[in-house]
Image (cartoon, coloured by chain):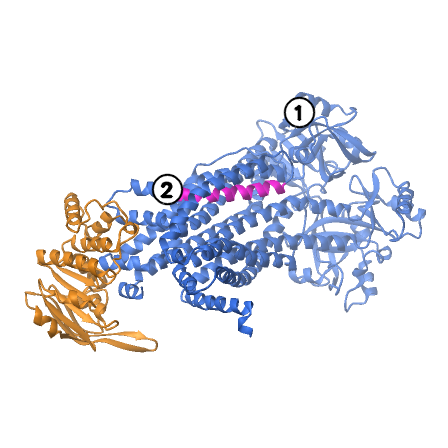
Amino acid sequence: MADSSPSWRNIIPVALHWKVGSRHLRRHPWLIALSILGIALGVAVVVAVDLASHSARHAFALSTEAVVGRATHTVVGVTGTVEVASYQRLAQRNATLPMAPAVEATVTVADHPGHSFRLLGIDPIAELPFRPYLAQSGTLDPQAVWALAMNIGSVLMARTDADQLGIKPGDRLNLLLPNGQAYVTVAVLIDKASEGPSLSGILVMNVVGAQQLLSLENKLTRIDLLLPEVIGDTTAANQLAGLAVVLAPGERIEPANARAEGYAGMLRAFDFNLTALSLLSLLVGMFLVYNTLSFLVVQRRPLLGTLRTLGVTQQEMFVGVLGEAALLGVLATATGLVLGYGLAEILLSLVTRTINDVYFTLQVTSLHLSPLSFTKGVLLGIGGSVLATVPAAWEAAKTPPRRVLNRSGAEDKARVMAHQGVWLGAIICAIATVLLLWPSHALLPVYIGFVMLVAGISMSLPAFALAMAKSMDYLLPTRWLASRFAVRTVAATLSRTGVAIMALTIALATTVGMGIMISSFRDTVSTWLGRALSADVFISRGVAAPHHEAVLPVNIMSQLTGVPGVAEAVAWRRLRVETEYGPLVMSGFDCSPRVLQLFRLRQGDSTMAEAAMRDAARQPPAVLISEPLAYHQNLPPTSRLGLQTLQGKVDFEVAGVYQDYGSDQGRITTCAEVFQRYFGEVGISGVGVFLTPDADAEATIEALRALATPEQPLWVTSTAELRSYSMEVFDRTFTITAVLRFIALAVGVVGVAGALMALQLERTRELAVLRALGASPGLVGRMVILQTVAMGLISGIAAIPVGLVMAAVLTFIINRRAFGWVIDFSIHPMIFFHTVVVALVAALIAGIYPAWRMAQVTPAAALRDD
Amino acid sequence: MPAHTLVQLTGIRHSYAEGASRRRVLDDLELTVPKGELLAVLGRSGSGKSTILNLISGIDLPEAGEIHLGGQRLDQLEERQRTGVRRREIGFIFQFFNLLPTLTVAENVRLPLQLNRLDNADSDRRLYQLLEQVGLAGYGPRYPDTLSGGEQQRVALARALIHEPPLILADEPTGNLDADTGAQVFGLLENLVRESGRTLIMVTHNTELAARADRVLRLQRGQLTRETAFNATV
């Protein structure tokens, strides 16, 4: 009696549907291929961005884990160093507590530019409880490892890094240090243990050797502590308080992972933006999925109508169509995951470069395959395909068989929906506007608002396409048969062309929006650099090492003033300070009126701010902070900002908020006197040199460069060079954006190509009639091309206002919320021209194959097939 | 080819692929159609009737044999040249009307003129005159999907005649119409063709229509034979 059960009754018609439907699709493999490619590209971008970001975070976590080891707490100092004497006092205070001194700095291998390492100086005897993995060297005797490590001037490094750089044990490495350069010998290569963190990106050496290399006499970077795990909070607090009393001024104990979390937090906005960009590509991909799967339904209306007439129920039809979508989704997702892995390899280098340029030094050698990234891809690919098909499946199931068989019914409905879409889109846009303008600093609502805005605008695009096609038809001369035929077809087949135009418009608008945002940002940064870099020459330790760690020779100022042509030299000191909002860069400038003028205040009175800044005895002391910090932490002028200083935590008053694009975390600036009072003499980080009016700039720069020695290298650069370098970094930062924009556009082109192919397939008979009436293959091909050009033109024109809206939201709302920057909107009119050209070229590319294919159609065969 | 002959097919062989094998539909077929004749071709479904029209119009090429149309050896022409001949010399009428849905009635009818670059000030007059002749005066701005089957086929007639081709090819011109409408449409076609002295080659199943032709041929086993029963009545 199995045949009478409801489940069997359902399966047979669905299986019949699949059999009939799949045979139809097998006859059009290109349609399947384009559908799979469209969905796969969307999945690939999301998976690639996620994998690249995840790999960078994973590398950072591993590197931090390797450096921090099992330490529970760390003693750190406000100036970045702690006294060796503090270590000795701590040991005397609690002889049984495991503690280890450490010296850490970022170094670059001179022969391998771009390869930075974290140099970690350790005490091999005190070390074992903290980083036991250092002794797990595989085949090597741990004793030998340590014996070698005891040699000052020798380093241990990961075998993977050594292999990558072609380094063997015994080789000498020329290291670029924050304070100069020096040679070290590679003593031992460490194999990665089966468990535990990798040493990749780390050079381990004796702490004494590291102190010597980094000129840190009697100083350490930190002291690691291993407090017992099972102790009550009160006991732990008491123990910490007991230890803290022996520390020097400015030193404190903090949880070992506090600093790492601060660094990781820097990437949050960057990660978020990358994810948002990838989701934009997915949105375009989803349009394609919807487009393609709608096609599959629309194109097979007679087939589905026949099945319905023969007795397939609505539910069976719905399940059958969704099943097809799921199958396509599975195939496309599998392709997307493979493509995503390949793309992630490219994105990883771009993400790593941006992190190195903008945030901190990080070496990421390989992709870390995260199951979560692949799961996201699978869910988006298969789930997205099924979701995108629901409307089409619903339509196929709900429409009466008589109407399913009637093609014009679909077009009537598409036209009605186009008009309804305008109203629905307007409502969605209104909700999106509320979300975007709602006074808040949260990022998620603006991203949701942005996606809703794009979706709302998209819904009105079919109506726009219809109006445009009708206007073009009206304006075209009667004799332009092919052109009029083309634009009429766009309007007459709106159920197919509408979504393709949506996909291409959104892809193009993304390009316009991102383009305007980036050019606005670039122009703003360029103008800002012109103002901020007003000195003629800049001197620092170099660009290879993070500048806040690099220190110039102590006598640099006296040397500079002796160089002919130098009118004035302005020094600054820079330090990464601990604030209640995480680590931030603080600078102390020589506060001449000339220097203070360089800070363009966005909030606060410049005269009052200048007076407050110059008053070294003022309580509370005054600082200027940059826009991102003021925005993210809600710190307007006169508010207080707590900083860890040599005198403990001190509240500083915000005297003004200045324009700055150097850091999205924000910066703090004060005058040299205040800086030295609270942070001591930390050494000069950089000098801006103003030349006399009659100075020969090139000769003076040469004279300044002559001050450098191999032991004390100086990076002397003209303003123009520094500006050019800064803009180069800026452009590098946006390379990844360019890649994602290109992919979004590629997805759009695939969409139009797919739409056209499906459309032309439907119109094969129509074009065959034309051929029978005497239209040449060339004319038929031209008609197809003209149709794609019409779609491209409509998309290109629509993309301009949509792109402008996207640019405004990205520039004024998203950039502001993500990074806290205020960007001046600047539009280069050529971008509009470029957009239309790109739209036409994309449409042409999408139309070439369909045009060629349709021109090849044999009228006899096409007419016979019907 | 004699001067009064418009179409001549000699030794035509043609076949279609059917899976791995080929099915021969025309086998040493011979046909001569004089100018001004109204010729009907009968035959069973799949016998190759439409293929004859496709060969005469240069849409298809024979595997063997010669096709002459108005003094030109059609089977030796390039595709581009054959398209040109079709554009100028032939008017097509299909069973399923095959009007272009995105063009209005007037634009559909005007299409052959535009393809032949003959669309000038005078063509409007000709267009509206023809629409009036087929009983569709005032239908110019309407779209095909707003017309009945009979009206659509009348538009197709007008489209086939507007550029005044010497030869009209009609493939089951009433096959998609009811008997009364079919008779009306064919009557119209017959009148227009005979009035202008054009040649009409029509393939059909409809023996009543065929009976009104000057000559009736039947396609059987790839060859045309004279249908005496019909021709006796002519």
Q: Residue at x 18, y 70 (%)?
A: B42
- Residue A227 versus residue A223: which sits nearer the camera? A227
Considering only order in the chain, which callout, 1 or 2, is on the residue closer to the N terminus? 2
**Quadrant the C terminus of chain A occupies:** bottom left
Whether residue A654 appears in this view of the structure is yes
Q: Which residue is mark 1?
A: A604
Q: Are marks 2 and 1 on the same chain?
A: yes
Q: Residue at x 55, y 57 (%)?
A: A381
How far apart are labels 2 and 1 at the CA level?
50 Å
- Residue A591 versus residue A660: which sits nearer the camera? A660
Q: Residue A728 vs residue A677: left or right?
A: left
Tag 2: amino acid:
Met
Q: Which residues are magenta?
A: A443-465
Q: Which residue is mark 2?
A: A468
Q: Where residue A828 sits in the image (x, y, percent)?
A: 46, 36
User: Which quadrant holds residue A244?
Assistant: top right
The chain identifier of the residue carrying mark 2 reads A
